[in-house]
């Protein structure tokens, strides 16, 4: 091959296809709204981790005594932390709602040979969530 | 004068091009025409060198999958009038290597499909004299949806995971594995689980869900994969509790 052929395509040979392979752009997730929603849903895991971390820090403060705990609570009241919590809550709600809506895809329940409708599966998930919330709320309010 | 619509068709001629480019053709805009009809018009009347695959023209063979305005579609089921105003962009399926124009190399899919053993596996075949394997309508109903797959590969073209991780076994192959797992005559689900639990199997899927949206046969590969994950996780848990009794 001559030096001038550096940019020229390699010669085509019969029965030896010269495939064209396109590389996936790093911005692939911006090409469709559905992809962007998907990436956003994946990112909500950061918010879940954030809440878990805050709970762990809260437990640590609790273990260190009343003074440390009130200092912790005071820190939570700063506007920045409140804003961060609001943002994280929005993300976690987005995560929870999309998750519940996806549940019927993975859970196929058959009763009497017929598939239980998707709406019933989603409804059962929300119901379980309501019951769990009521139980936790009941325990918290009952302690007072 | 008859109305016309412009088609922007991806061209790749390996003997002269180093990468694909678009060529615009004007075709009659007929109400009863699908994109495939327009492609055939181009090939018959305007440029006989245009290459694309097609066969049945009625959504059965799964050969004519391409991207129409960016979305993976069977071109035999994509009406021109549903994609107005033009120009209508026609490109080969995404993530597959392009051989020429709109023709892609499907070897990767064929290899993966074979891997999941998409056939009825029996530990021991029943002698013919004992008759056929019977199945009730409910037993048929359990897997029928997944059996509608026509191997058109639109789901692969819609799956960014397959684009990013080409080793991923992919939506249709997993849906077809599930089709046989749910078949009352089949005894091969353990073999398939071994294959699909590996690194390139179902766990690569992060549930983007686009495969289900583009499926022309409502197979719901995304659902099949999530159901399979649930089974895989349950199986793993069983082996954890009782390493020997799981199977």
Image (tube, coloured by chain):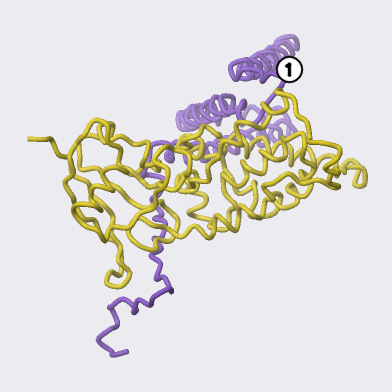
Going by the image, does B196 lie left or right of A31? Answer: right
Residue placed furthest toward the front: B129
Q: Is residue B88 in sight in this rendering?
A: yes
Out of B148 and A107, give the one closest to the viewer: B148
The residue shown at (77%, 50%) is B191
Q: Quadrant of residue B146?
A: top right
Residue placed furthest toward the left: B1
Query: Tell me, what hue is chain B?
Result: yellow
The residue shown at (56%, 44%) is B171
Residue behind mark 1: A111
Residue B201 in percent (x, y) is at: 65, 50
Q: Residue B3, relative to residue A137: is it above or below?
A: below
Q: Residue B165, relative to residue A92: is it above or below?
A: below
Residue B36 in percent (x, y) is at: 32, 44
Q: Residue B46, relative to residue B2: is it above or below?
A: below
Check disc 1 and report its element: helix, strand or loop: strand
Q: Quadrant of residue A112?
A: top right
The residue shown at (66%, 55%) is B115
Out of B199 and B33, give the one closest to the viewer: B33
Marked residue chain, label 1: A
Going by the image, does B40 lie left or right of B227? Answer: left
Circle 1 Cα neighbour tier, 10 Å, few/some/many (<14 / 14–19 / ≥20): few
Query: Tell me, what hue is chain A?
Result: purple
């Amino acid at each position: 091959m001559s030096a001038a052929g550096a940019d020229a395509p390699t010669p085509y040979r019969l029965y030896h296809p010269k495939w064209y392979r396109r590389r996936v752009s790093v911005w692939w997730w911006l090409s469709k709204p559905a992809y962007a929603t998907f990436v956003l849903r994946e990112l909500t895991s950061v918010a879940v981790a954030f809440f878990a971390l805050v709970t762990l820090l809260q437990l640590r403060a609790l273990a260190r005594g009343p003074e440390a705990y009130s200092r912790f609570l005071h820190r939570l009241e700063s506007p920045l932390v409140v804003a961060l919590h609001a943002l994280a809550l929005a993300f976690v709600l987005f995560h929870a709602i999309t998750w519940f809506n996806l549940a019927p895809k993975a859970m196929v329940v058959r009763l009497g040979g017929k598939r239980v409708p998707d709406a019933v599966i989603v409804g059962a998930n929300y119901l379980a969530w309501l019951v769990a919330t009521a139980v936790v709320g009941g325990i918290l309010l009952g302690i007072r | 004068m008859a109305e016309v619509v412009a088609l922007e068709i991806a061209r790749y001629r390996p003997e002269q091009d180093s990468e694909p480019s678009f060529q615009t053709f004007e075709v009659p805009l007929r109400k009863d025409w699908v994109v495939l009809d327009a492609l055939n018009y181009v090939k018959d009347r305007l440029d006989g060198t245009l290459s694309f695959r097609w066969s049945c023209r009625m959504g059965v063979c799964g050969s004519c999958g391409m991207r129409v305005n960016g979305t993976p579609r069977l071109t035999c089921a994509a009406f021109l009038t549903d994609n107005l105003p033009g120009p209508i962009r026609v490109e080969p399926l995404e993530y597959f290597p392009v051989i020429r124009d709109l023709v892609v190399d499907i070897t990767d899919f064929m290899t993966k499909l074979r891997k999941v053993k998409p056939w009825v596996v029996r530990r021991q075949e029943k002698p013919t004299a004992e008759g056929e394997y019977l199945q009730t309508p409910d037993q048929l109903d359990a897997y029928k949806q997944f059996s509608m797959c026509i191997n058109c590969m639109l789901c692969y073209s819609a799956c960014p995971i397959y684009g990013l991780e080409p080793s991923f076994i992919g939506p249709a192959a997993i849906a077809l594995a599930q089709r046989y797992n749910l078949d009352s005559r089949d005894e091969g689900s353990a073999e398939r689980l071994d294959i699909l639990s590996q690194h390139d199997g179902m766990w690569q899927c992060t549930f983007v869900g686009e495969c289900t949206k583009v499926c022309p046969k409502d197979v719901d590969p995304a659902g099949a994969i999530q159901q399979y994950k649930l089974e895989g996780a349950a199986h793993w848990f069983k082996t954890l509790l009782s390493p020997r009794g799981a199977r």
